[in-house]
């Protein structure tokens, strides 16, 4: 009887871990591959898209940063406000650096509808009114380094590249966020080396205007960046991450806000991946179809398998509590001791990131465990019919 819960626990955990093992092997194999940015500078035109909602505390710094880091690129700037209730609109209208851009446009939405809705409306406006080759989308709380935009533009000298994302440098981040971001960037770069990545950082990403089907954006999902990257690849061009072009942002100051942000992001990616299921086995997409399948398993199936492993673990503990273990049975004893040791390590890793105790390797495992906790929470909210696609503000280290 003691074997049954233990075997279920081992089986569920092994199945949940398979895509992570595959991803680890891919990371190892990708070391022999390189992403080389073209030396030739792309000479096309650029439009910057800045969606905002209640960004008064960071807007002036953001606009000044765009003016300073995009000198020589002569970009258009389109700002869309999603019904802010603070001074965001008056700050945009009164900013004195408007002449630094080829054109400076403020669009205002009558009601708050979420970031993806704002992005979609702004892109429709750009397609109708501005003759541009590239679009650079950025967030108000993300600051560029001096050469970020120019580095991204270089990639478009390669006609096979349709979308490029910058890499994050997050300030004030907790242990689990530091490990999560590091793992996220490694995986995105690995996927880019093999073909394309379906996920990029919407805080700083650039794409060819004609490569994106704007109508494909689903406004009921907040994963606008993932939708854009995936749509560009499905339309035949690659979507990659540049590991040498950076933007800087700040982590939420409070853990509760950080967790809410991660659950919102997780739900958006889950919905996005589920909507892409018709492409999971499409041979026309080559290696990218396999990437979509793997990410779908990791975001939708592995979290549920880990819940099954947790239930089996609790059942095993309950069984042991009411049964007498024959410690003369070496197989049974070894199995239970091994499971207890593994459970202790997993629990310790989760505690290390929850309480921001920096321990190498343990934090990496903890980041994976914490990520799956947020994925389970996102699945639960979706099952209850709760949508988290609306914008939310957080208090960071600057406020």
Image (cartoon, rainbow, N blue to C red):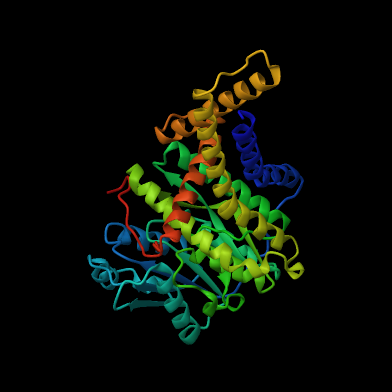
Question: Would you place residue 87 above or below residue 318 in this image?
Answer: below
Pick the residue in front: 9 or 371.
9
Q: For residue 233, what is the image quadrant?
A: bottom right
Q: Position of residue 235 (x, y in %)?
A: 66, 74
Q: State the residue at coordinates (49%, 63%).
A: 223
Q: Is residue 126 left or right of residue 332?
A: left
Q: State the residue at coordinates (65%, 34%).
A: 7
Question: How many numbered circles does the render carry?
Answer: 0
Question: Would you place residue 54 above or below residue 247 in this image?
Answer: below
Pick the residue in front: 9 or 318.
318
Judged from this view, the residue extending furthest toward the top is 328
Pick the residue in front: 70 or 143.
143
Q: Is residue 19 left or right of residue 88?
A: right
Q: Position of residue 209 (x, y in %)?
A: 56, 76
Q: Quadrant of the N terminus?
A: top right
Residue 41 showing in the rendered view: no
Q: State the residue at coordinates (55%, 68%).
A: 228
Q: Position of residue 349 (x, y in %)?
A: 50, 31
Residue 326 showing in the rendered view: yes
Q: Position of residue 392 (x, y in %)?
A: 34, 59
Pick the residue in front: 76 or 78.
78
Q: For residue 13, what is the image quadrant?
A: top right
Judged from this view, the residue extending furthest toward the bottom is 128
Q: State the residue at coordinates (44%, 82%).
A: 125
Q: Is residue 256 left or right of residue 199?
A: left
């Amino acid at each position: 009887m003691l074997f049954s819960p233990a075997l279920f626990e081992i089986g569920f955990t092994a199945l949940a871990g398979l895509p992570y093992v595959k991803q680890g092997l891919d990371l190892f194999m990708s070391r022999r591959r390189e992403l080389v940015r073209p030396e030739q500078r792309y000479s096309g035109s650029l439009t910057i898209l800045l969606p905002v909602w209640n960004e008064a505390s960071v807007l002036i710094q953001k606009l000044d940063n765009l003016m300073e880091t995009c000198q020589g690129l002569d970009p258009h700037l389109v700002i869309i406000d999603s019904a802010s209730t603070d001074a965001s609109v008056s700050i945009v209208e009164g900013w004195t650096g408007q002449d630094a851009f080829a054109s400076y446009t403020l669009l205002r939405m009558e009601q708050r509808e979420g970031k993806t809705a704002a992005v979609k409306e702004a892109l429709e406006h750009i397609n109708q009114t501005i003759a541009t080759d590239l679009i650079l989308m950025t967030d108000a709380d993300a600051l560029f380094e001096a050469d970020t935009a120019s580095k991204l533009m270089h990639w478009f000298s390669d006609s096979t590249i349709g979308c490029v994302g910058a890499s994050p440098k997050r300030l004030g981040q907790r242990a689990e966020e530091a490990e999560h971001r590091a793992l996220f960037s490694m995986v995105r770069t690995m996927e880019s080396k093999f073909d394309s990545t379906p996920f990029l950082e919407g805080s700083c990403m650039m794409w060819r205007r004609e490569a994106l089907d704007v109508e494909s954006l689903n406004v009921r999902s907040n994963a606008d960046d993932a939708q854009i990257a995936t749509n560009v690849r499905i339309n035949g061009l690659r979507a990659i991450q540049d590991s040498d072009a950076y933007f800087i942002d700040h982590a939420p100051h409070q853990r509760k806000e950080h967790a809410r942000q991660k659950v919102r992001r997780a739900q958006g990616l889950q919905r996005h991946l589920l909507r892409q299921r018709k492409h999971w086995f499409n041979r026309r997409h080559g290696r990218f179809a396999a990437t979509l399948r793997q990410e779908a398993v990791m975001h939708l199936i592995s979290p549920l398998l880990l819940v099954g492993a947790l239930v089996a673990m609790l059942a095993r503990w309950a069984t042991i509590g009411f049964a007498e273990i024959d410690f003369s049975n070496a197989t049974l004893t070894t199995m239970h001791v091994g499971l207890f040791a593994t459970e202790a390590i997993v629990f310790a890793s989760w505690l290390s990131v929850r309480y921001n105790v920096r321990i190498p390797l343990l934090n990496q495992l903890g980041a994976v465990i914490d990520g799956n906790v947020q994925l389970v929470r996102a699945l639960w909210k979706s099952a209850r019919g709760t949508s988290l696609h609306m914008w939310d503000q957080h208090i960071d280290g600057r406020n």
